Image: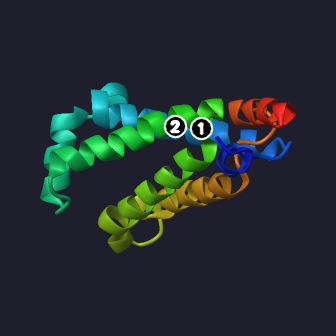
Amino acid sequence: MNNTLINRIIGTDDSLAGLALRIPAGIIFAAHGAQKLFGSFGGHGLEATGQWMSSIGLEPGFLMALAAGTAEFFGGLALLLGVLTRPAAAVLAITMVVAILAVHIGNGLFMSNNGYEFGLSLLAISVALAIRGGGAVSVDRWVAQRVNARA
């Protein structure tokens, strides 16, 4: 595979900022995904989440719940490890745009009214990680260094 392509996908800098963004966002996303997929942490699981998504017009509900839960759970794990950070963050950013527009936008900004401020924060983190990558303490950085050393 072309080193340029690999660097575009996993390339990152040596900043610790990526780590500071990845760890809390990864925990939050993985936990929310586990709620949707497995019913963990007080969640309702895939079937009930799918029914709820159908009720708000996201059809087919089960597949939408599966897609959102999978993106959040596995994307969150990817962020925690800093592996494929850019693609994972891009998928999570899209997931947050859908959540904001489909669920929260009509409730205003503030979380106290089920608004979009939390989703907007996670969207901003995801976009930043999609642009900058995982940072110094990431699997992406380690792999990129090995690939570039061979070139």
Residue 71 place in picture, x, y as percent: 41, 43
SS class of the residue under badge 2? Answer: helix
Q: Is residue 104 above or below residue 62?
A: below
Residue 103 place in picture, x, y as percent: 31, 62
The CA distance from mark 1 to mark 2 is: 5 Å
Q: Which mark is residue 119?
A: none
| In the displayed structure image, the side of residue 59 where residue 66 appears, left or right | right
Identify the residue position indicated by label 2 in the image.
76
SS class of the residue under badge 1? Answer: helix
Examine the image and state in which quarter residue 85 appears.
top right
Asked whether disc 1 touches disc 2, contact meaning CB atoms under 8 Å apart, the reply is: yes
Q: Is residue 127 above or below residue 133?
A: below
Q: Nearer the viewer, residue 77 or 84?
A: 84
Q: Residues within 10 Å of mark 1 (few under 14, many from 20)?
A: many
Residue 87 place in picture, x, y as percent: 55, 48
Identify the residue position indicated by label 1 in the image.
79
The reply to whether residue 137 is in sight is yes
The reply to whether residue 114 is in sight is no
Q: Amino acid at mark 2?
A: Gly
Q: Nearer the viewer, residue 101 or 70?
A: 70
Examine the image and state in which quarter residue 138 appears.
top right
Quarter occupied by the C terminus: top right
Q: Amino acid at mark 1?
A: Leu
Examine the image and state in which quarter residue 55 appears.
bottom left
Q: Residue at x 82, y 41 (%)?
A: 16
